[in-house]
Amino acid sequence: MQHYSGFGLIKHSLSHHENWQRAWRNPTPKKKYDVIVIGGGGHGLATAYYLAKEFGVTNVAVIEKGYLGGGNTARNTTIVRSNYLWDEAAHLYEHAMKLWEGLSQDLNYNVMFSQRGVLNLGHTLQDMRDIQRRVNANRLNGIDGEVLDTKQVQELVPHMDCSANTRYPVLGASWQPRAGVARHDAVAWGYARGADAHGVDLLQQTEVTDLIIEDGTIVGVKTNRYGDIMADRVGAVVAGNSSVVAKMGGFELPLESHPLQALVSEPIKPILDTVVMSNHVHGYVSQSDKGDLVIGAGIDGYNGYGQRGSFPTIEHTLQAIVELFPIFSRVRMNRQWGGIVDTCPDACPILSETPVKNLYFNCGWGTGGFKATPGSGHVFAASLAKGEMHPLAKPFSMFRFHNGALVDEHGAAGVAH
Amino acid sequence: MLHIYCPHCCEYREEEEFHVKGQAHLARPLDPDACSDKEWGEYLYFRKNPRGLHHELWVHAAGCRKFFNVTRDTVSYEIKEVYLVGEKPSVVAHSGSAK
């Protein structure tokens, strides 16, 4: 792998940047791998990277039906935080946060992780009580957090309407200073480049059409391009399409796939240097380095795989943003899109063994998977390498929906949906 | 914007008047106390979530407030059929085609 550095940039400028090495190979697959990861999004690529780098399993293939990082990795609003209420979730997301903090150096790829802080606004007394409870829980778990009052929020975000005259006045907020945003595409590309450098085969434009299962044990996958590819263990990291792959394995998951929309405005001058989220008026907004406002809100209510959503949802989203920021009311929106998020009944992910032996699923991240990318990849890689779920992943078994040990982050935490 | 035909109002109305309530034809176990944890968990949480034809329950929340079933394609979002609760759908996925 070619090392990226400032010196390299100057050196390559002498040859007009025409001689950069390709970031990853385009390999022909082997007949058999130790581990196959289905899905080349952020989580799948991170899984492959940590498998090869940390756990010494280099005979790995990532099979992606489209192009790398072209699904939800490219469609989210790039927010990274770890202020979850319950211990299980807090530990998992904080594990990811710690990896985020060293990720650019680890990958030798600038993921533009910017710890600009995240505000979760409270608009009712109950919101404020929930925020205090959550911030206390966070601090007990060693996660930074503060409860701010209206005045402190106004100081952080001078352009937000924090007056008492709004329909839903801002009473305060939780504030996680270490939270922030990262460049989503760079995360996928950085992990892909790192995985490839450690010998992982990245197979793009290759769709898994079926799973090969013998006596209740998975032994490989069928693909549309390379026929059958065998493997000792298979990890499915296919987000919105998890139920489709589970069906190939002959079981159901407690998931429903929904479109989640996001939109960006035209680029404007710097106006917002943090991330503002509100569960109550239901919207979130940050400003990218390019200057556009990155805006999101809730899922469309119905199931969908269409990677687009409906207009009423966009309207509700923008109503919330304009309620908070009347100054944005005349900013024009540039682009809008949808990603397919696989939502779990308890708003927590599934990192799990399945009814099929040696087949593992990493799914159900719902509307908040991007922030977990490094942690998710790391614990899933550990689980695939050992054939046993990592301790941080154990509470997130799909079988918790049989025994009732749910990790209910819905509403209770900073989960915005 | 989906335009949904309410079989009770006998009119097409806009999506915003309706709420989707999830998979249709879910039968509550007749004797919940006799269910194993697995059976009860699957009734509560496990859903079909197909890529393709899906039968789902909708309610005309801002209208007549009555429930009905919809058969909808989850990729094109096209509504294939609207039918009353208790009726069987006439448009169904062929087995194996709804991958």
Image (tube, rainbow, N blue to C red):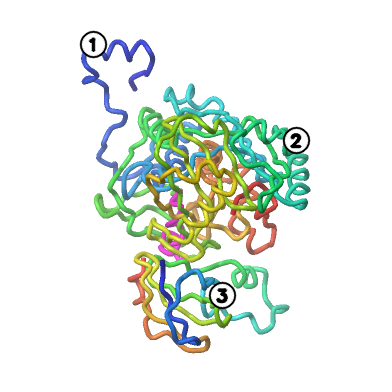
Q: Are marks 1 and 3 on the same chain?
A: no
Q: Position of residue B93 (x, y in %)?
A: 36, 76
The dot on residue A14 is: 1
Q: Chain of mark 2?
A: A
Instruction: Give SS at disc 1.
Output: loop
Specify the quadrant of the image occupied by residue A398.
bottom right
In the image, A385 versus A189, the foreground residue is: A189
Amino acid on which the number 1 mark rests in the picture: Leu
Amino acid on which the number 3 mark rests in the picture: Ala
The dot on residue A139 is: 2
> Is most of the magenta stretch helix, strand or loop?
helix
Name the quarter where the C terminus of chain A is drawn: bottom right
Q: Is residue A334 left or right of residue B60?
A: left
Residue drawn at x 45%, y 49% is A262
Crowdedness near tag 1: few (<14), some (14–19) or many (≥20) residues, C-alpha within 10 Å = few
Amino acid on which the number 2 mark rests in the picture: Arg
Name the quarter where the N terminus of chain A is drawn: top left
Q: Which mark is in front, 2 or 3?
A: 3
The residue wearing badge 3 is: B62
Q: CA distance from mark 2 to mark 3?
A: 43 Å
Q: Which residues are magenta?
A: A235-250
Q: CA distance from mark 1 to mark 3?
A: 66 Å
